[in-house]
Amino acid sequence: MFYYSNPANLAIVACPGGEVFADQVIVHLKKQYHHVFSVTVEEMSRRFKTEPDEVMQRINFINEITTTGMNPHSSDMKLHAPQFKVPAHFTMFPNGEFKAEILKSVRGKNIFIVQDVENHYPLKFNGGTLTKELSVNDHLMVAYVTVDAVKQAGARSVTVVAPTYPYARQHKRKGREGVTASRIGRIFESLGVDCLITLDIHSRDIENSFCRMRMENLHASYQIIRKLSHLVPLYSEDFVVAAPDTGSIDRNKFYATALKKPLALIYKERDYSRVTKDAMDNNIADVKLLGNVKEKIVFMADDILGTGGTLLKAMEFLKEQGAKKVLCAISLPLFSGKAVKFFDDAYRAGLFYRIIGTNAVYHEELLTREWYSSVDVTKLFAQIISRLHQGLSISSMLDNRDAIVKSLIKKI
């Protein structure tokens, strides 16, 4: 079975914060479409008893007359792949306002706007004459004006690719406060966004709060387990999965089930009258353990690491309980404030062995740390983008348990 959809109708617009992530996604997109094109040519050549060269010419001919954006200088014997990335100009005015200008026609195309709202490194605006570090709110505003510019330019559909969903931890009310996580998505929805792709959303309540916009919530468990298998022996009898708090039970139960390992639970009692300032000044009052971690290799997984207080407290507690080696996996490694320094200190103190994080959040300093291992999720995003563009099912990509099992069987 083969599928082929003209790639010239797929376009990527990268906001300044998401440009690095978008460029890596595009590399994988090009590889995927070259592979799909080759498979399509081979299959059609066999099915219709036609020479491969003739099939290539006919596919390129159809692509050329039905779409714009192809490279007119490409050989007829090769895939006429577009560049995918649409050039855009971003302006930041002295009063802090942003403007997005799309520099190439996107009329009738499926547009994917990529934005990393947690990129806090200096970014270039105004044609490179201005360098500025942006807050989450600034990144959100850039995304909003980019969506508006693309809609005004006549895009057929608009999908926002936000590996980190902003305000995700404000997903339920405990008093007189807003449910901002839902509100952010509804703003995108009101702007005409058809779909939002993110990684490991903090709560499923968020994706159930929209009327028209779809949310595709991806998981990096396959990539994390592959990296984990290179760091420790997964089939050791001493391997235990532990949930660092009650909110992460389901996530760690998934890993425990996939790896066929026991699940331990760290229960924390919090003093909510205290406001958490940083990793060393948190509101955790007491910690208890359900399970056995003595002389064990302990693996913990969580979705977001902000200041890191919860994880640091859990690692310290596990070592006090006799854990031999502690490893953690974080889908969205924000490392806010002085978190990197605190984890440097904890590593030197022997509280943990490795932390596995994804490149859903852009980092430079973190990648230099011996204790940090990064996994690439841009290929996963590229596969989802390609499948959505082609109108194919993505259910196998969202529930990757079968892929994990197959990967583990190969290592036995």
Image (cartoon, rainbow, N blue to C red):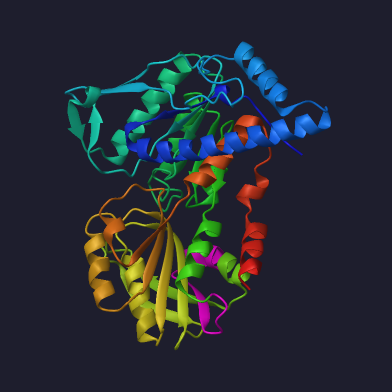
Residue 6 x %, y %: 62, 24
Compared with residue 233, is residue 146 higher up or lower down, i.e. above or below?
above
Residue 36 x %, y %: 64, 36
Q: If the image is split into quadrants, where does the N terminus sit?
A: top right
Q: Is residue 95 magenta?
A: no
Residue at 48% from the left image edge and 68% from the top image edge: 230
Q: Is residue 172 visible?
A: yes
Q: If the image is split into quadrants, where does the C terminus sit?
A: bottom right
User: Which stretch is magenta?
Assistant: 234-252
Q: Quadrant of residue 133?
A: top left
Residue 380 x %, y %: 53, 46
Q: Residue furthest top?
A: 65
Compared with residue 34, is residue 221 higher up or lower down, i.e. above or below?
below
Residue at 63% from the left image edge and 11% from the top image edge: 65
Residue 84 x %, y %: 48, 27
Q: Is residue 290 left or right of residue 361?
A: right
Q: Is residue 240 magenta?
A: yes
Residue at 52% from the left image edge and 42% from the top image edge: 381
Q: Is residue 280 visible?
A: no
Q: Quadrant of residue 164?
A: top left
| Front one among 370 and 265 | 370
Q: Is residue 35 left or right of residue 26?
A: right
